[in-house]
DNA sequence: AATGAATGAGAGTTCATTCAT
DNA sequence: CATGAATGAACTCTCATTCAT
């Protein structure tokens, strides 16, 4: 058992390379040669490159989903019929996001992968994520709805995605930004620091005043 | 001159395909065949695929930079030594962003390209943008600094990028989101609507209270 | 014993797939997955793909050879020194061909396999068949020789193969032809019907007048 | 012009290898290395292996079809309303088959390819041939119908295919048979000799008496 | 007796780029 | 100024076979 088994080695290497360079730019040869594994092993164990990509995500999202459901169960048990405050919900989500990959010591990778999932043209991946993990997001959305009754539904929808963008975009582009920040402000920033910084911004964003009625909105 | 010349045809086609599928996923064959242009034409006119990508960006960013400088000149002339309010700065930027591609009728494409520039592993592109357009961003940053004197420098740096993330992420992932929004809330959303919605959120985010002192954070 | 044993399952599946798609186009994975058998089982039980192909043939040809020898024994016993008429010989062969796979309920598969053996580039198979089953064909040829004393030896040799071609080609390409025939003439044809139709044609072909002397033929 | 151009070199090599070993058993690497041509050239010029296979056929069938139509035109002009005798039709077809590839000095290859087209599992090829060359076969069939008015339509259909089988099977398996014939009967046989031998057999087969009514035709 | 894991070889295809014309 | 032809490299995937257990 001294040497990690092939499947794990592939997954570990793949997630790092995917996160660094994207899906299309990472070839199976890159992965297998770095993982010191036969080229055919990917197809043997996963079936295809697409399936490998999905497996990389599943390894993060499966435990995340499970824990997040549990966390929400606890919150609902505690608050009963009263709505759970927005801050608490966000806090709970953030904590779960931090916990899961912490064990694998690669939060950065996880976030970066999430970013890629949104921006890279991997339709199959978007479908996969929606199918397998859509329900937990729906549950969270519904709780957010109860926490922000004053927001029109459409507005809340968009703001959730605004905030999603804030988080994913920042964290997934972290490497480049971190270099600049370090040079200019002498700070060494971890993902945890950023999440700490993000919290008030996200809350303020969600609670921002409604835009004035669109009035003579052009074209 | 009846038929648009080769270079323009390539640029027009390339920007659409890049925006739709990303850089790596768009082959020169895709571009040249759709543009009805010889395969070798790209290398002939631009030298390489990388140079084509940069040219696509330059066609947007050159006029943008010029106009934005002008707009900032006007503002500075008007406000003199007084700091320009944050809302005004953001408003000015938004207007310029909207104006430039409006002439080419492809705001969506522009935004999507910006998103790709950040998330796709095109180091050369990031370098190119920083080299050619870094100065205008620096000027804008400095003005924001004066508009938000109470924010620590590092905090402002990060918040600016948070907000950049909000905007680019949302707008560049627009197509997918728009489908959902339309189905669920019966809204048909344009980029302009979204910018309208984004404004209060961005302002609130920038003005959010500072995070409580991080305590003995770090990883 | 309720579940058929591995070897038989492999043979059953292999013969069907080979007949449907040919040898090269049928992979061991196709066979083993459809047979619900381990991939390595083929190599374990048969040694190689070639050996499997031969085994598939042997399962038909061994009983065929045995019965055909018996049938010819009977005929020789009955006719003594007199030559056995051509029609009788053909009839006897046809009956044997029909009997053997009838038990396995897959005449079509058998014929199709025979066709493949001739047309697909499996040198090893041709050699195998010739080695193991050449003698019964020789015996049959000799009887045909006595039944058609007026034919020059070379002519008889070729005509036998002409007729072999007629039969194998028709029956092994049956599926495609059957579709056409059914559509155009509203007939639903079985292999038995075709053999019924083939008989007079084959006899007439064998008894056709000799070609006029080739004159100064050559290529 | 000293060295034949790439496309022709590919076609020449491909047709020989296909004829020798079949389609699936011949790799593009086989072809391009033997033709001393870059591997990518096949995809560049033909698009895919399938398209190459079709091109190989078209190079024979296009001139064949044209000439055969001309030959049938001549016959119809000569016979007017009277039916063209079966022997004349077959003779005309045989002559055309012999003429066309004679110029390319590779009748054997052509016939072998035809055999493969029927027996190898290349659905696309069967479709291609039917689409492009179905009409000339239909025209021929109709003339045969008028030449054999006493035959029921279905019977004629099947007999035509019987005879097709005779010819294609024999000629395409020629190499193996020729070896035997040469050893046993000291003959050296050319395709032309065989066609000479085939003629009376085919005619006799077409004119064979009808099979007795199927009576108690079993399953 | 049987199998999951692994492997080297080779398949067809696509790529950005180059070059002679 | 422009292009058809060509190319070497790299791609994902499938193959029959082997081997430790």
Image (cartoon, coloured by chain):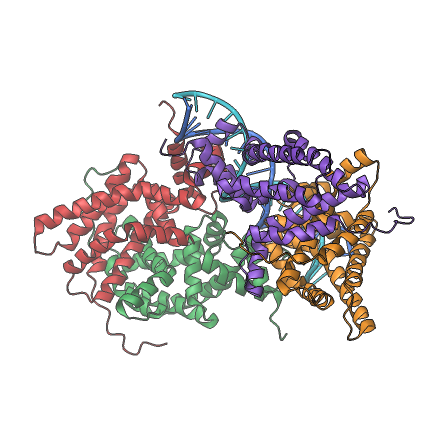
Chain colours: A red, B green, C purple, D orange, E blue, F cyan
The image position of residue D176, as x and y in percent, is: 73, 38
Q: Nearer the viewer, residue B156 or A85?
A: A85
Of residues B176 and D191, the one nearer the viewer is D191
Name the residue at 70% across, 49% down.
C203
Task: Point out residue B63 in the picture as x, y percentages from the top left corner.
Answer: 48, 66
In terms of image quadrants, where is residue B109?
Answer: bottom left
Say which of C155 and C33 sits in front. C155
- Does any portion of residue C130 appear in the rendered image? no
Q: Is residue C109 above or below residue A13?
A: below
Residue D19 appearing in the image = yes
Quadrant assignment, res B169: bottom left
Seen as rendered, the residue at the extreme bottom is A216
Task: Residue lying at the far right in this picture: please name it.
Answer: C216
The quarter of the rendered structure image containing the N terminus of chain C is top left
Residue B147 appears at what percent x and percent y? 28, 60
Nearer the observer, D97 or D22? D97
Q: Position of residue D15 (x, y in %)?
A: 72, 48
Name the residue located 34 percent from the left edge and 64 percent from the top edge.
Answer: B179
Would residue B163 be found to the left or right of residue D155 on screen?
Answer: left
Would residue B143 be found to the left or right of residue B103 on screen? left
* In the image, residue A67 above or below residue D60: above
């Amino acid at each position: 058992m001294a040497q990690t088994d092939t499947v794990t080695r592939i997954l570990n290497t793949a997630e790092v390379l995917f996160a660094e360079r994207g899906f299309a730019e990472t070839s199976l040869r890159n992965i297998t040669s770095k993982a010191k594994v036969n080229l055919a092993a990917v197809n043997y164990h996963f079936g295809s490159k697409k399936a490998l990509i999905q497996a990389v995500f599943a390894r993060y999202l499966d435990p995340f989903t499970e824990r997040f459901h549990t966390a929400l169960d606890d919150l609902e048990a505690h608050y009963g019929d009263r709505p759970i405050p927005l801050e608490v919900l966000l806090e709970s989500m953030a904590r779960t996001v931090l916990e899961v990959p912490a064990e694998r010591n690669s939060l950065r990778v996880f976030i970066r992968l999430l970013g890629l999932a949104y921006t890279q043209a991997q339709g199959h991946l978007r479908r996969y994520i929606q199918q397998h993990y859509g329900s937990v997001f729906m549950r969270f959305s519904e709780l957010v709805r109860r926490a922000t009754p004053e927001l029109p539904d459409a507005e809340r929808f968009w703001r959730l995605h605004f905030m999603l963008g804030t988080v994913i975009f920042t964290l997934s582009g972290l490497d480049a930004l971190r270099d600049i920040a370090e040079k200019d402000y002498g700070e060494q920033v971890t993902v945890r620091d950023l999440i700490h910084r993000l919290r008030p911004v996200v809350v303020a964003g969600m609670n921002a005043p409604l835009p004035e009625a669109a009035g003579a909105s052009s074209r």
